[in-house]
Image (cartoon, rainbow, N blue to C red):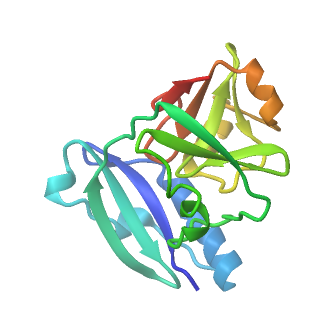
Amino acid sequence: MSRLLESIKVQDGVLYNLEYHQDRMQRAWKSVFGIHKTVDLTKEIRIPKNAQQGLFKCRIVYDLQICEIDFNPYQRKEISKIVWTTDEKISYSHKFENRDNILRHSKKLNPDEELIFIKGGMLRDASYSNIALFDGKDWHTPTYPLLKGTKRAELLRNGRVISKKIRPDDLKNYKKISFINALNDLDEMTINL
């Protein structure tokens, strides 16, 4: 079975959204491995000196226990074009280390292109992030993403995004799309529609 992972934002030596990452890890341990396990990431993660300034991705790989923790500088992707793809069999209900079922769709993309999945006639996710669409007043995120991301969960809880079923035909009602994940907040990585 593939190992799982968490990607945590580290900005100037501060870890972000740990409660959401811990919750997702605990749900994965129960769902994937059938065990009840808790984790306190503040005790597991030690930020090295070279990751104390700037934006870094803390990557945790785990199975029945934490296997690896590493830190890498993070650079946001520049997106200028969206490529839409329909896949009725795609599944990514847990953040698995093996992402072959997603990556096989993006092999032919240019570096500035981002993939968005459609399944069951609904918008789902991009290849590395959840999505939120702005209609000029509110931000909406698909009700049924492929993966329930930690940033998406925070934005929903804080009322900054609204869950909504979004079909491709609804895109005419939106002005822009934001790619959100643990390292990208709402409206940090955005493209006009």
- Image point (66%, 29%), residue name: 133
Q: What is the quadrant of the C terminus in the image?
A: top right
In the image, is 164 to the left or to the right of 155?
right
- Residue 174 at x, y = what percent? 70, 21
- Image point (34%, 54%), residue name: 57
Foreground residue, 160 or 102? 102
Foreground residue, 172 or 67? 172
- Residue 182 at x, y = what percent? 48, 48
Foreground residue, 118 or 45? 118
Residue lying furthest front:
108
Foreground residue, 60 or 117? 117
Position above or below: 183 against 87: above
What count of labels does the image hold? Answer: 0
- Residue 62 at x, y = what percent? 47, 77
Position above or below: 60 against 190: below
Residue lying furthest left:
49
- Image point (51%, 82%), residue name: 63
Residue 158 visible in the snapshot? no
Give the quarter of the image for residue 111.
top left
- Residue 102 at x, y = what percent? 59, 61
Position above or below: 113 against 103: above
- Image point (58%, 86%), residue name: 1
Residue 16 visible in the snapshot? yes
In the image, is 95 to the left or to the right of 91?
left
